[in-house]
Structures are given as structure tokens and as C-alpha cells.
Image (spheres, helix red, strand yellow):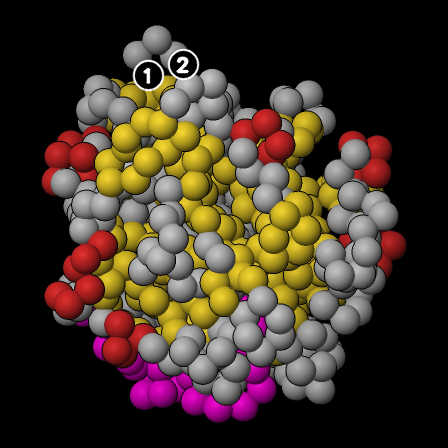
Amino acid sequence: MRDELMRTLSWVVLSLGFAGGGAAQTPFPAFSPVQSADFALPGSLSNSWADYDRDGDLDLAVSLKSGEIRLYRNDRGTFVSVGAAMGLPVSGAEMRGLAWGDYDGDGWPDLFGGATEEAAGNLLFRNEGGRRFAAQAVDPVTAGRSARQSSWVDYDNDGDLDLFAANRSGPNALFRQDAGRFVRVAAEQAGDDARPTVGACWFDYDRDGDLDLFLANQAGATDALWRNDGDRFTDVAPALGMDRPGRPRTEGSVGCAVGDYDNDGELDLFVASYGVNILYRNKGDGSFENVAPRLGLAENNHAVGAAWGDYDNDGWLDLFVAAYTGKSGAQQPANRLYRNLGGNGFANVLPPGSALNVADHGVQWIDYDRDGALDLSVTRGYTASGGHFLFHNDLDKAAAQRSLAVRVVDRAGRFTRMGAEVRLTDASGKIIATRQVSTGEGYNSQGTQPLHFGLASMAPVTVEVTFMDKTGRRTQRIKHVRAADYARTELVIRQR
């Protein structure tokens, strides 16, 4: 149930400053808190969403500093804690990151937890038909690491999910899956990176048919963009001007998020940083330019996680950034919700004192009640007043219905096509939006939620999906898709 006492968030009207003009009034959709008392658990770190029981709505997993992995079953909008009863840990080593993925291809999403303590083992839980989770041995993935982002991806296009494990205190590792076994890819092939990595985003930046890897590295280290060359990875960040050399140890990159902010069909990259944040615009020729300064995103802060989502369904991706201010032990959230001004700039629409300003780690956009509007899921790990908070998007019904949810699955109908790209085009063939099936975003998180498209109108669209396999990039199209036909459900596209 939502907290009625906190509905003061409803229909706040904010004053936005547009470049080149005076202030303009923009209605800010209300967000109402959901089950705040149940979710107010200190030490909340990563939040990740998946329909683990396949009942048609998204469930929530949260990692806590206590070592507990809290799992909430979504019962038609009411969340019930079921993790302990289903075999997930209630204490132990801190699991800093969570990643959902159907690694065994049985149609049920499994859960991987990365341990922060180097002496502790990482955890893989096999989903047994939505009834319980069974811990699996995952050696040598359990080798000591201070885990940050873990990602399920098919880096070699062989049809099954491989595992990437970022490490805050040593070399990262890439594990190829061979029929349920995970075999570490040789360092000279995988480009094992010993820099202190926190965030990792996989996407096919050069459109050559395989997933490349961007690494957000901390403690003054340079960033990396490892180009997937099939038989090995090559770091091209220095050549592309994306390595950011010369940062002091107090600065560094923390999180990354992939999204097409300007609707040109190319996947862009936001990098949340201790220091100045970056937005790399993909120029479509294999290179990038940092457009954050001219678009209003180059803030100098302690940004941790970020996620793209069209919260107002106007057809343009907005951006939530979880950041904080203050010294260790006294950190306070300093969040930003950047509304996309038609691809030409961003304006922060979170006013001082907003009840949404509670995150310092995780952030995810999800439609947990399937009403067509993106809801906001965040975590606060610092201070005793932390929690994993959920806010319902109270967008009016007509605007909420201007949306389309798309789920991309493989040939067997399983959710394993992380990194696949979906584009919408209008009747004239113009690209109006692009999304990527998540390979990791927010804060050390990977979920299996469908892709959400806000729509400027309800006119029919063509849905174009780009899959990657051994033959390279393959595109499938479905024409004359009417969003109204998929209200409160999703369009499922299966790889041919």
C-alpha cells in the first residue's frame, strides 16, 4: 500500500530554466512512496528487478551490507519479503552487486551475487521453477575479488550467457560458459584489466556484431573501452579520448548507463563520476564526443549510479543520477532527475527537499504495476536512515498509456539476449527511439525488465530488433505495431 501521508509529492510544478530563454513552467509528474516502512532497511546497496516466478510482474532483489539478499515478491503491487523462505542468505558476506540472468536456459531467471570481501565466495542461485533458489558451485568465479558490476552477456555470440566480473581491488575476469561450466577466458584474450573497476557497460559501439565493454574505473585510474575483436579485446579508450587521464586519486568513474538520448539511433554513454560527469555522444562512425558541458550534465559531484528512463512518456530519455555530498559517515543524498529537453539539453527537475532525493547507490526505472508509466526504485546505503525505496509514478492515465513495453527473447523464448537493440520508427521511416536490453546499469545491477518506450503519439510504429550471433548483426522488423494493443502487457519479440 502506498503511504498516504507522503502524497505531498503530488503534482509539484517546477520552474525549469531553458537555455537561451527565461524560466518555463513544466508539470512534474507526482511520485508516491510505496511501502516505505517495509523498505527502510539500512545498508541497502544494489537493486535489481526480474519476474522470478513468471507471474507477469516484476519482483525486487536488494543486496544489504549485512549479507542478506532481500527478495520481494510482487503480488499485484504489494511487495512481500520471501527471500529467506526461498533459500537466499539472510546474513554473511556483503554482496555488493546483483545480476539476474537465465544462465542455464531453463526459462527461469537465476541470480548472481558478487561478494565485496575478497576472502568470501560469490554466490550463484539457480531458480528452481520459481519455488526456491538453490546455491550452485561457481569455481573459479569464486576466486577472491572485491565485487562491483557483474554482468550476464553473450560476448562470443554462441547463444548462451557468459559472465563478466568486475573487481574493485584486482584484475577483472571474463568467464565463458561451456554447458553450465564457467571457464575463465585467458587474460591475453579477455584484456583482463587490473584497474579498480566499479561500473561496466557492454554495447556494440562500433556496430560490428559483437558486444564491446566500457569500464568505469575508480581512484584516479583511467577508464577503458575494450573493443571486442572476436578472438581478443583491445583497449581503444586512449585513441578515442575516453580514458580521462590525470585524475587525482580522489576522483574516478563509478557507474555507466547506455541510452540513445538524442533519438538518432546510436547508443550513447553516460558516466557517473567522483568529479565531473560525462555524456559521450556516439557519432555513428566509431567515435564519441563529450557533450555533457553543453547539455547541462557536467556537474562536479560524487555520482554513484545512473539510469535512463522516459518518466514523462514524451519520447525522450530522461536521466536519474544517484549522488551524495558530505564526508564519510555523514553522506547525504544529492540526486538529480534530468529531464530531456528534446535532445538539446537537460534540466534538473528535483527541487530542494524533494522526497525523491533519498538515493546514494542504486537506481532503476521499472513499471512494477504495468500501468505504462515508469516507477522509480532507489537505494541508500550510507547512514542509519537508509533503505531501498520505491516510488510510484502518478502520471495521468492518458499519458501513461502513451507507451510500449518490449521484451526480447531468444529462439527458445528465454531472456538471454542482453545487449540486443530495439528501435522504433514512424510511418516515414524516421527513428524515434532506441533502447538496449540491459547489460548493467544503476549501481552494480542487472535486471530482466522489458524495455520501456514513451511515445509522443499513439500512431502505429515499426519495431526493429537487432540481434547478434555468429553471423554478425541481424535485424527483424514488425510493422504497424499499435501501442494500445499492448496496454498493461508487453510485445514479445523472439529471435528467428
* Residue drawn at x 75%, y 61% as measured from the top left: 250
Q: Where is residue 89 in the image (x, y as percent from the top left)?
A: 45, 87
Q: Indicate the quadrant containing the N terminus: top left, top right, bottom left or bottom right.
A: bottom left
> What range is drawn magenta here?
78-102
* Residue drawn at x 42%, y 19% as measured from the top left: 21
* Residue drawn at x 51%, y 74% as measured from the top left: 382
Q: What residue type is labelled 2?
A: Lys
- In the displayed structure, 341 sits above or below 230; it is above
Q: Nearer the viewer, residue 422 or 176?
A: 422
Q: How many marks?
A: 2
Q: Where is residue 441 in the image (x, y as percent from the top left)?
A: 52, 53
Q: Mark 2 points at which residue?
A: 430
Binning the other alpha carbons within 10 Å of mark 2 as few (below 14), some (14 to 19) or many (20 upward) gives: some
Does residue 172 belong to the magenta stretch? Answer: no
Q: Indicate the secondary structure of the residue bearing disc 2.
A: loop
Measure the alpha-carbon separation of dots 1 and 2.
6 Å
- In the picture as drawn, the residue positioned furthest to the front comes out as 22
Q: Which of 215 and 347 is in front in this view?
A: 347
Q: Position of residue 330 (x, y in %)?
A: 55, 75
Quarter holding residue 59: bottom left
Horizontal side of 286 relative to 432 (left or right) equals: right
